[in-house]
Image: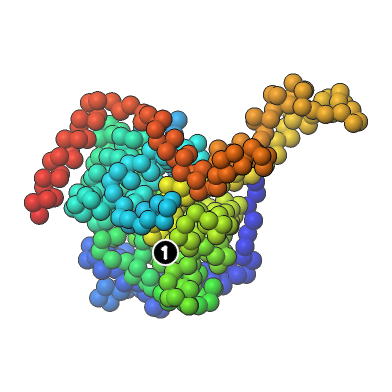
Amino acid sequence: MLPKFDILTIEQVDKIHKNSMKILNEIGVEFSYDPVIEIFKKHGQRVEGHRVYFDPEFVENMVEKAPSQFTLHARNPEHNLVCGGENIIYMPGYGAPFVYEADGLKRDATMDDYNNFVKLAGASKNMHMTGGTVVEPTDVEDEIRHLEMAYSHIINSDKCFMGSSSGYEHAKDSIEMTALLHGGMDVIKEKPALICLINSVTPLKYDDRMLGGLMAYAETGQAMVIASLVMSGSTGPATMAGALSLQNAEVLAGITLAQCINPGTPVVYGSTSAVTDMSTGSLSIGNPENALFTSASAQFARFYGVPCRGGGGLTDSKTVDAQAGYESMMVLFAASTTGVNFVMHTAGILQYYMAMSYEKFMVDDEIAGMILRYLKGFDCDSDEKMAFDVIEKVGPGGHFLTQKHTRKNFKLEFFRPALSDRQSFDGWSKDSLDTNQRAKLKWQEVLASYVPPALDPEVNEKILTYIEERSKELLKK
């Protein structure tokens, strides 16, 4: 992997760190979940109502307990993932309520869409896991939606996936289903198999739903992303340094809580911060400021010794056009080259997290493949790679097309696009398909040929029984 570059100076990191600690100590963070308040009281933090004021030394000590990297275990060990260090994990978009189709149609996302996106991620060579809430399937009751979503990941792929964090009970359901998949709770406590997303409510608040999820995951030693989305100019200061200080304070508060509950709990420093478009008042994510927040967050994660989440194929565009391409490449490239380890929203997102697109998924998957090739850099480790002998053989004025060395190495060295068109103009003009049209054909082809990896029938039956019983309980409430 290529070396990562720092976006901030050492002096800037120190100033923002100290500013964040001042925020935590003098302004505090509100936690609306009573069990969490009791935890902080037991750990000697000053509490007034639901607001907690943190001792900076205590925060630093707690954050040090978090591991610098950890392994997520898939049901297929070949898909186990190391989160942290030089490793990077790509996965699809998360949480979009709508699907935008190639012809411009906007519609509610469904469970069929959910299954399709999980299959596309399962089929992809560039998506390392199938993600979490790839869309919000509005045709499934909210009370049992998390069960159906978790099962989709379990049955449609053997890669790692994310669980629900929408409250303590839903989180426990995800954990219980994952335990059944892996052979028991004791197994996943020793070998974490699940990760969730915990979001703060900016500015400086965590709600009871997220806190319940955080507690469930921490209690069982499962991993979690602790993330803050500061909308600079509306939910946070309009200055980049101020917004980053606020984000940092919120993330540190969440990491501290996780370590209070269960020291050594795997956590990921998460950033989704961006800016408010002042002409519309809406969030904007396809911009250089987002890339800067992402890069700075990766640097702060290294500073605190934990993995980082950020970036993705992010765009404000509503269709798969040039804007979607250049914005997505900018943000994903920044994340990938500055040290982000866990990349949500890598593929499929349109209009600042509002929609998923099948066509955008295929475009982003291509971008991800290009970046992964870039990150491999140059291989200079052997005489064959240095190619002196074949250069000598061909000599001045020759060519390398017919050389065995070329036939052997081009498949290893060259990125081979699945979507991009490299034909001559005459070849392309026979069909004259643009990127959007080619992407539509591609995702349909992938889904038609995809065969989900088999799941042990006995394990499947146990999970289906669990879903049936829990669904009855939840729908009665």
Q: Which residue is mark 1?
A: 228
The answer to which image quadrant residue 252 occupies is bottom left
The answer to which image quadrant residue 183 occupies is top left
In the rendered view, does 149 fall on the left or right side of 391? left
Q: Badge 1: how crowded within 10 Å, few (<14), some, or many (20+)?
A: many
Vertical order, 443 against 399 (above or below): below
Task: Give how far across and how far down residue 416 sits, in percent.
Answer: 61, 36
Amino acid at circle 1: Ser
Say if residue 76 shows up in the picture. Answer: no
Q: Quadrant of the C terminus?
A: bottom left
Find the residue positioned furthest to the left. 476
Residue sitting at x 38%, y 43%: 117
Vertical order, 281 against 331 (above or below): below
Residue sitting at x 22%, y 35%: 463
Task: Give how far across and how far down residue 333 sits, in percent.
Answer: 58, 53
Q: Quadrant of the N terminus?
A: top right
Say if residue 470 shows up in the picture. Answer: yes
The answer to which image quadrant residue 259 occupies is bottom left
**Coloring scheme used:** rainbow
Find the residue positioned furthest to the top. 404
Residue sitting at x 78%, y 31%: 386
- Kind of element beneath mark 1: strand
